[in-house]
Image: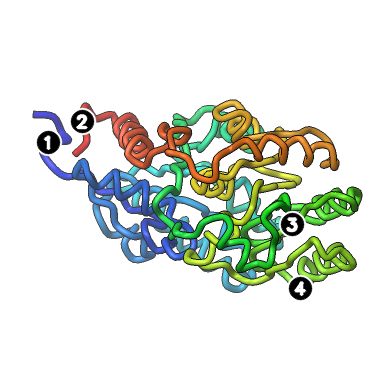
Amino acid sequence: MTKSRQRQVRVLARPARSSLKHNPYTSLVYGEVEKVGIQVVEYRPYRAPFGRWDVLHVHWPESVFDHTLVEALPTTESLLFGVRRARDRGAKLLWTIHNLHTHEQRHPFFEERFWRRFIAELDGVVALTRAGLAAACERFPALSSKPSWIVPHPHYRGQYPDTLGRRAARRKLGIGDDTRVMLVFGRMYEYKNVPALLRAVRAAPDEDWAVLVAGAPRSAGVAQALRDEAAGDPRVQLHLEYVDASSAQVFFRACDLVVQPYREILNSGTALLALSFDRPVLLPHRGAGVDLASAFGPPWVHSYAGELEPATLRRALSAAAALPERSDGSHLRELDAAAVGAKMVSAYHELLGWQQIG
């Protein structure tokens, strides 16, 4: 009998399901992992040092630095203490790479110090794309010597309400049937470079276009920059507030194309959300854009190099017009949660060196 048959594998995940309200990613993956008998437990600071864990699986560790330094430093010390104690008791530390730094980098000195200490403890890493793994190894050369696995981001099809048709969604937003509609969706950060899209649209004043900007700005400065760029162009609608899961369908079903004019794009859950709503994506040819363009290609994923120009928008919108309002989802089959969960189980399998897990 193999070791995995003798006892249940236990994974302490940070987070497991506590992020479900804002992002169902971990819930989707761990739901599949649990189907083979692996126990997944939500991380709490007191659990890491004292429980018996096979894997301590960490997502988004950098998020603690989105808070004040007074809040961030005790949290990072608690996490690192738990990591060391869990590893002393036999756990393997696994990091899924979503970001390589905080979006705003408010505390760069302390964040870099944390990364050095955290990466020194790692037993392995999971990347969502090959481009993401390469970027991570360039940013943190020590990762090159760690075991690594590519476990893609699952799609979100069926995870969000999706009952509206295109015409009904547009009526809610006051947009005509023949207008070509672009959407920028999600939390608004400076690096997302949304003003670049608004400038490209403004450079084509005669086009029957509309732009929906839907999501809460990270700061008052980001909000003001968007208002300044949108001023004077009635084709731009700013919906600068948090969009809950039930309202997301209004924006995705109303649009023809989701645009991500980001300066940096390591990974993109928004792109997967767009594809899950059968909407094509336009994004820069770097990071996640490289892998998504390779995996899907036109008409689902369009990438561009350099500055975003009106001609690029015209080409992507023209290709989007050929797509049906709804699809059978076959373009997303390889990103089914079951397939992604199986890859994560295999990663645990290899990390632990066991013949079987479950």
Label 2 amino acid? Gln
Disc 4 from disc 1: Cα separation: 55 Å
Q: CA distance from mark 2 to mark 1?
A: 8 Å
Q: Which is closer to the viewer, label 2 or label 3? A: 3
Query: On the picture, is 350 further left or further right than 214?
Result: left
First of labels 2, 1 by sequence position: 1
Residue for badge 1? 5
| 93 and 165: which is toward the camera | 165
**Residue topped by disc 4:** 220
Mark 2 neighbour class, 10 Å CA radius: few under 14, some 14 to 19, many 20 or more: some
- Residue type marked 1: Arg
Lower position in the chain sequence, tag 2 or tag 4: 4
The secondary structure type at the circle numbered 3 is: strand
Q: Is residue 304 left or right of residue 307?
A: left
Where does the C terminus fall, quadrant-wise? Answer: top left
Labels 2 and 1 touching (C-beta < 8 A):
yes
- At horizontal 86% and vertical 48% (from top left) the residue drawn is 200
Q: Nearer the viewer, residue 356 or 114?
A: 356
Element marked by disc 1 = helix
Number of the front mark, 4 or 1: 4
Q: Looking at the image, do the residues carrying marks 3 and 4 touch, with CB atoms under 8 Å apart?
A: no
Q: Which residue is mark 2?
A: 356
**Disc 2 element:** loop
Question: Which of the pair 94/193 is nearer the observer?
Answer: 193
Q: Read off the residue under disc 3.
A: 211
Indicate whether 329 appears above or below 244.
Answer: above
* Residue drawn where x is 51% and y is 42% of the image: 120
Of circles 1 and 3, the one toward us is: 3
